[in-house]
Image: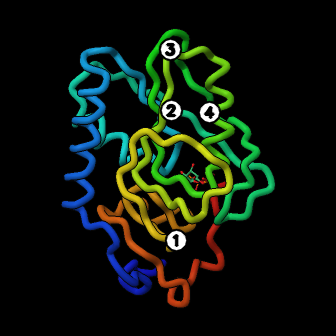
């Protein structure tokens, strides 16, 4: 397994900048919902780090739940958009304020499908909070209420985002130099 320093071409967002922006997002959400309870839904797995930092900056009552989806027929590095739920929520959405928390919106296909599904569960309101928005790659229009950072079309990893399931634990968002990144040939990749 390579040390990330071997293929890191740049630190796009350092830890202090990430944390400062997440505090701002939390403060904005607290202000917008002003005392109303909210349910934050994290789509596993990339959004986990962001969710756990974000909720610590929110002062309104917060509940959390998790969903996992997998894309049909997708390559390892892009989503096809047709999603299958592999882990469903444990909570009812009816009549609740819901915020969907994502690490990154790329084509928008995953989010579009998940939003379509969640709307059928009759939340009082539903919106999206994403840490990263790679809008150059958008194929489907999805409304994003809270965006941490708009980023260029570069291959990013760290702070929840993986490279073949590893490196999610890094405290910054980095850019991969694909020429220097060599995935372990014997590695088993989770779907
Ligand atoms: C990422 C990310 C979004 C999706 C965005 O998840 O967390 O769910 O891709 O891509 P899209 O806008 O093109 O649909 P990924 O499938 O990499 O799974 P992970 O969160 O487990 O890493």
Q: Element at badge 2? A: strand
Q: Are marks 2 and 1 in contact (CB under 8 Å)?
A: no
> Which residue position is annotated with label 1?
153
> Which residue position is annotated with label 4?
115
> Which residue position is annotated with label 3?
124
How far apart in space, not on screen, are marks 1 and 3 (Cα)? Answer: 34 Å
> Which residue position is annotated with label 2?
66
Front residue of 184/124: it is: 124
Front residue of 85/140: it is: 140
Q: Are marks 2 and 4 in contact (CB under 8 Å)?
A: no
As displayed, is residue 129 above or below residue 90? Answer: below
Which of marks 1 and 2 precedes in the sequence?
2
Q: Element at badge 1? A: loop
Q: Element at badge 3? A: loop
Which of marks 2 and 3 precedes in the sequence?
2
Cβ of mark 1 under 8 Å from ligand 1: the answer is: no
Name the residue at the right extreme. 73
Q: Name the residue rendered at 21%, 44% in the picture.
A: 23
**48 sits left or right of 118 in the view:** left
Q: In terms of image quadrants, where is residue 62?
A: top left
* Residue 165 x, y percent position in the rendering: 54, 61
Name the residue at the top extreme. 95
* Residue 162 x, y percent position in the rendering: 50, 62
Viewer-side label of 2, 4: 4
Q: Quadrant of the C terminus?
A: bottom right
Q: Point out which mark residue 89 bears.
A: none
* Residue 9 x, y percent position in the rendering: 40, 84
How far apart in space, not on screen, are marks 2 and 1 (Cα)? Answer: 28 Å
As displayed, is residue 23 above or below residue 58? Answer: below
């Amino acid at each position: 397994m390579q040390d990330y320093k071997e293929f890191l071409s740049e630190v796009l967002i350092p830890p202090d900048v990430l944390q400062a922006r997440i505090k701002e997002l939390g403060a904005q959400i607290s202000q917008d919902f002003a005392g109303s309870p909210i349910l934050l839904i994290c789509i596993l797995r990339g959004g986990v780090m962001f969710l756990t930092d974000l909720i610590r900056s929110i002062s309104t009552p917060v509940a959390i739940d998790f969903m996992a989806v997998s894309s049909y027929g997708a390559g390892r590095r892009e989503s096809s958009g047709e999603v299958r739920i592999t882990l469903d929520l444990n909570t009812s959405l009816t009549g609740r304020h819901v915020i969907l928390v994502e690490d990154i919106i790329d084509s928008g296909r995953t989010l579009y499908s998940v939003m379509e599904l969640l709307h059928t569960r009759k939340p009082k309101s539903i919106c999206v909070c994403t840490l990263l928005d790679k809008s150059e790659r958008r194929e489907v229009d999805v409304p994003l209420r809270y965006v941490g950072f708009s980023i260029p079309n570069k291959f990013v990893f760290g702070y929840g985002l993986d490279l073949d399931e590893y490196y999610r634990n890094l405290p910054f968002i980095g850019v991969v130099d694909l020429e220097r990144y060599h995935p372990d040939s014997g590695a088993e990749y989770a779907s």
